[in-house]
Amino acid sequence: MNIHSSLRSLGIADPNGSGWLAVVFTFLLAGTVTWRLIPAVRKFALRVGWADQPNARRLNREPLPNAGGLAIYAGVIAAVVLASLLRPIELERVLAEVQTILLGGSILVLVGFIDDQFGLPPLVRLLIQILTALLLVANRITIEFSFGTPIDSTLSVILTVLWVVGITNAINLMDGMDGLAGGVSFITAISLLAVSAQVPNRAAATLVLAALAGGALGFLSHNFHPSRIIMGDAGAYFFGYVLAATSILGNLQAPTAVSLLAPVLFLLLPVLDTTQVFIRRLMAGKNPLSTPGKDHLHHRLLAWGLSQRHAALILWSIALICNVLAMRLQNMTLVQILATTIGIIVFLSFIVLQRIRTT
């Protein structure tokens, strides 16, 4: 089981390893489209008033355009569609699964955008998130395990819905500081891509993850502090949903404990952040779902005197360590893990240096 066996289904793998061309092309195209669209989206958003005002969660001191998610979505979809047209993917079950993931993600982009600009009741947002999670279940994208009991399938559905809805909101809640949600999403997407490339017949999922990583990187070039634009609920919901779904795609036939632990490790930082906020607010007698506040991990780092840039770098590092552990749990070799880690560090370093030079 190796990278070539998965990339061969892209229709371009050969003894020289050119199967990576489709992945690289998709990544670069999504990043370029997103990067080039952001200035136009930002300009239009400011003109029509699509912006977040300073509030109890955001750190901006003036209205900040919140339509970056539209550019991310456009970049990802454009890259996946064009790559698929240029290199048709062999018919496989995972292709239908990926189409389902993108459909659910598209629904949440629309819901997130409406919420960004007009506001939606929390219950409405939660209901739609549950329905999009059930869309995955209907296409057999679930956390699969077996204890040999009749309730296994019911428990699998419940855990899948909780996982998808939880991660979707966790990424959204992390989008309170420049560069944080985008950086964590990029690290996770690249790590999941590296794992997906090891599995036969996962070419479609690999392309989607390449596009998602490219979109995150293109967005980060405008979002690392000081941010010119934020992704808003539209972008955060899209990242959270797609990452949550792809992290359980296939489950690699792992033992029960491992199949549950690996997805959690990939997204451990947002899981821990949301969990500690939930517990602290409950203990304080507050509504953990609807009460905004500066009680997330990044707020605590800032309270200790760190800058937004330093806080983002620390949390990126924690996310990267968690993803390295997750990749090891998925039986990737040390060489593969090292190559993936170096790639992540190089790309993020480029973004950081580019933003420092231009601000």
Image: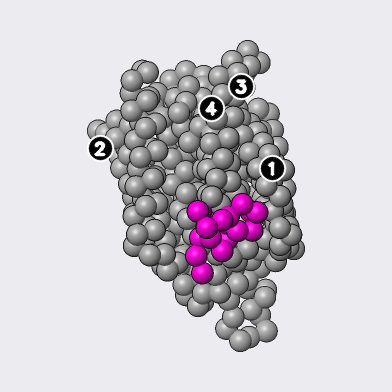
Q: Which corner quadrant of the image does residue 252 belong to?
A: bottom right
Disc 2, SS: loop
Q: Amino acid at mark 4?
A: Trp
Question: Quick check: 42 left or right of 126?
Answer: left
Q: Which residue is mark 3?
A: 41
Image location of residue 26, percent across then percent down = 58, 41
Residue 315 counted in the magenta span: no
Circles 4 and 1: CB atoms closer than 8 Å: no
Specify few, some or many for label 2: CA neighbours under 10 Å numbering under 14, 14-19, or 20 or more: few
Q: Earlier in the sequence, mark 4 or mark 1?
A: 4
Disc 1, SS: helix
Q: Which corner quadrant of the image does residue 116 belong to?
A: top right
Disc 4, SS: helix
**3D distance between C-alphas at marks 1 and 2:** 50 Å
Q: Which residue is mark 4?
A: 35
Closer to the eye: label 2 or 3: 3
**3D distance between C-alphas at marks 2 and 4:** 33 Å
**3D distance between C-alphas at marks 4 and 1:** 22 Å
Magenta residues, start to end: 1-17
Q: Amino acid at mark 3?
A: Val
Q: Which residue is mark 1?
A: 86
Q: Earlier in the sequence, mark 1 or mark 2?
A: 1
Q: Which corner quadrant of the image does residue 326 belong to?
A: bottom left
Q: Which residue is mark 2?
A: 304
Does 181 sit above or below residue 170? Answer: above
Toward the front, the furthest residue is 15
Image location of residue 332, percent across then percent down = 41, 64
Residue 12 counted in the magenta span: yes
Closer to the eye: label 4 or 1: 1
Residue depicted at 71% across the width and 58% down the height: 90
